Image: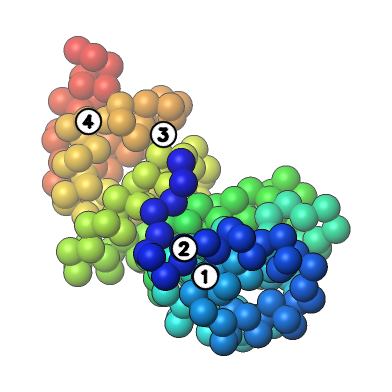
Amino acid sequence: MERRLPAEYSGWQEHETAFRRMTAPELIQEIQDGPPDRRLAALSVIDLAEVDEAIVEDWIRTLPDAEANELAGAIPVQRARASCDDDLRWVEVARLGYERRHLATFLVMLFSSLEAMEARRCPQSEAAWERVSAWVGDLYDSMAARGESEVLDDLSLFVFENYLGREPVFEAFCGLLVRQEELARKVSTNPSFLLGELDESHQRRALMEAEAGGGLPFRDSWNLLQGV
């Protein structure tokens, strides 16, 4: 499905072929100073591994949403010759991007980068999963306090629905069940939604934490999960 973009980006694909022949400095110049259609085209072909980290962070802060989404999609994942330190860099870039812009593409790329580190058997992988999982818990708390329902929906859709089987994510989720009554109620009244693919011990743990956080009594939520 083709993306719906503001009118100022019309025809941006027409630049792609020519831009693929440009050097990284030339593409950076386009992104810094070009009109919207050329900026988007440059972002679609640039190799972010050749861009200084400070420049990438500036783009995260300043680019319009359509271009920031393209920037997120340009985050390198599973590059054949990338090092574990490179992968860790993209984890941090994606985390920063979502934290500042709340665009779901950054969240998707964050966890894709974590998976890339894991597939490469990077020694930093376990610590990265734990750090990002703790960040997810803190972010959920702060966004719930501010009533940012779209961010909470993103975390549910792109994190909890896909990665709750990862132990650090599960631990962060259990902490949220105790602290966030609305989440505890959602999970305990429809436990199969997020807990259906977990093993029994994790299901029981989550529903007990949900009860402690203000959800249904464990017996009731367990019966719902079992279809009783």
Amino acid bearing label 2: Ser
The residue where tag 3 is placed is: 202
Q: Position of residue 226 (x, y in %)?
A: 27, 16
The residues bearing labels 3 and 2 have C-alpha atoms spaced at a distance of: 49 Å
**Which residue is pictured at 15% across the width and 25% down the height?**
220
Is residue 125 among the parts visible in the rendering? Answer: no
Reading the chain from its start, which is encountered first: label 1 or label 2? Answer: 2
Q: Position of residue 5 (x, y in %)?
A: 40, 60
Reading the chain from its start, which is encountered first: label 3 or label 1? Answer: 1
The residue where tag 2 is placed is: 10
Reading the chain from its start, which is encountered first: label 4 or label 3? Answer: 4
The residues bearing labels 1 and 4 have C-alpha atoms spaced at a distance of: 45 Å
- Mark nearest the camera among 2 and 4 is 2
For disc 4, the neighbor class at 10 Å (few under 14, some 14 to 19, many from 20) is some
**Which residue is pictured at 59% across the width and 51% down the height?**
112
- Mark nearest the camera among 1 and 4 is 1
Give left or right: position of 220 versus 160. Answer: left
Residue 92 sits in quarter: bottom right
Q: Position of residue 104 (x, y in %)?
A: 42, 56
Residue 195 sits in quarter: top left
- Mark nearest the camera among 4 and 3 is 4
The residues bearing labels 4 and 3 have C-alpha atoms spaced at a distance of: 16 Å
Name, please, the residue furthest toward the top: 228
For disc 3, the neighbor class at 10 Å (few under 14, some 14 to 19, many from 20) is some
